[in-house]
Amino acid sequence: MTQPWSGRTIWIVRALAAVSVVSVAATVWLGLWVTPPDQVQRNLVRLVYVHPPIAWVALYLAFGIAAISSLLWLWPRTRSISWDRLAAASMEVGTVFTALTLVTGAIWGRPTWGVWWAWDARLTSTALLLVLQLGYLALRRIPGDPDTRARRCAIGAVFAAVDVPIVHFSVNWWRTLHQGATVLNANLSPTIHGVMAWTLLLGFVSFTLAFAWMLTVRYRIQVLSDRLEGADLDMALRERWSEGDE
Amino acid sequence: MSYIDAGYAIALAVLAGYAGQLWQRRRRLERLAARTQPETATATAATAPVDRRVTPTLSETRVGA
């Protein structure tokens, strides 16, 4: 039986939402009005305070959680329905962030490169990631018993996770239009400083908090959906039994 | 509208819209679950004699033992 959220849980979830909203608002304020224009990119650098943080959530956080949860479900010793639910929740939220990564990247690319889209290794591998995420969500909708569904989705998530290192290293492995890593580069020496670096860091923190809130709520939705699905099945079985008694 | 404004507006609008939709979905399912719970309990009580003959509950097993 699914218990409603306790008062403490509701308080924590609301606090997380409030902190997320405040930190995202601070990122927007710093990014649009406080930070100076860049020497090369001029004002377009302001998009850098939202695009990489959104991409960080989509690629590393959401996909990482989904892949690790799926592996933990596949391993018999740690198998639990909670891992399957966490993977499903993380993948759905991650899909929204991946789509936004592509959209914000295209908006930055149009004035910088002159085109909305290029078949560049980084862009193409990220688009492939979005297709794989949509495929995962489609897999979850295929009818079947929960165990079979969890198994095929877990295998799908682990298979799709192969694309994440390809996206990350694409700028090193191929000649691409997309710039190299600003923070997590080969020398681990960030090429951004001062208030611009702090704003970027705040962007990473704020979008991570927003993701954490969305993941918590989406996980709860998964728990409730599973319970209602089970209740529907119980009801249908009882109806069949009562028909048999008559 | 500049590219910068458009980028921020789209990112924030999509995230806010998705967050609102998640909150609505959760509230709807919570309400549905709260409604289903008593119905399920009533239905279980109605079919209880049949169920008990097939699988005794833990408390009944203890009483029987």
Image (cartoon, rainbow, N blue to C red):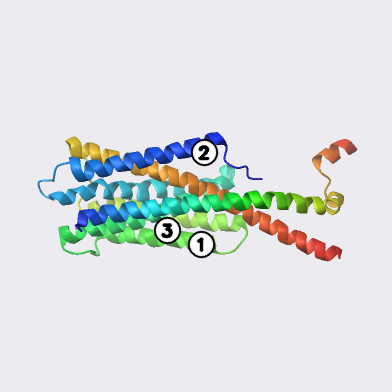
Q: Which residue is mark 3?
A: A133
In this rendered view, identify the residue nearer to me: A79 or A215: A215
Q: Which residue is mark 2?
A: A10
Name the spot of residue A81 as percent of width and height, x first: 58, 48
Are the residues at dot 2 and dot 1 in contact (C-beta closer than 8 Å)? no
* Residue under the image location 47 percent in, 52 percent down: B22
**Residue type for callout 3:** Gln
Name the spot of residue A77 as percent of width and height, x first: 58, 42
Q: Which mark is residue A139?
A: 1
* Residue under the image location 28 percent in, 54 percent down: B9
Which numbered disc, 2 or 1, marks the residue that appears first in the sequence? Answer: 2
Figure quadrant of residue A199: top left
Q: In the rendered image, is residue A231 in sight?
A: yes
Q: 10 Å neighbourhood of mark 1: few (<14), some, or many (≥20)? A: some
Which numbered disc, 3 or 1, marks the residue that appears first in the sequence? Answer: 3
Which element is circle 3 on?
A: helix
Q: 10 Å neighbourhood of mark 2: few (<14), some, or many (≥20)? A: few
User: Which callout, 2 or 3, points to the residue nearer the camera?
Assistant: 2
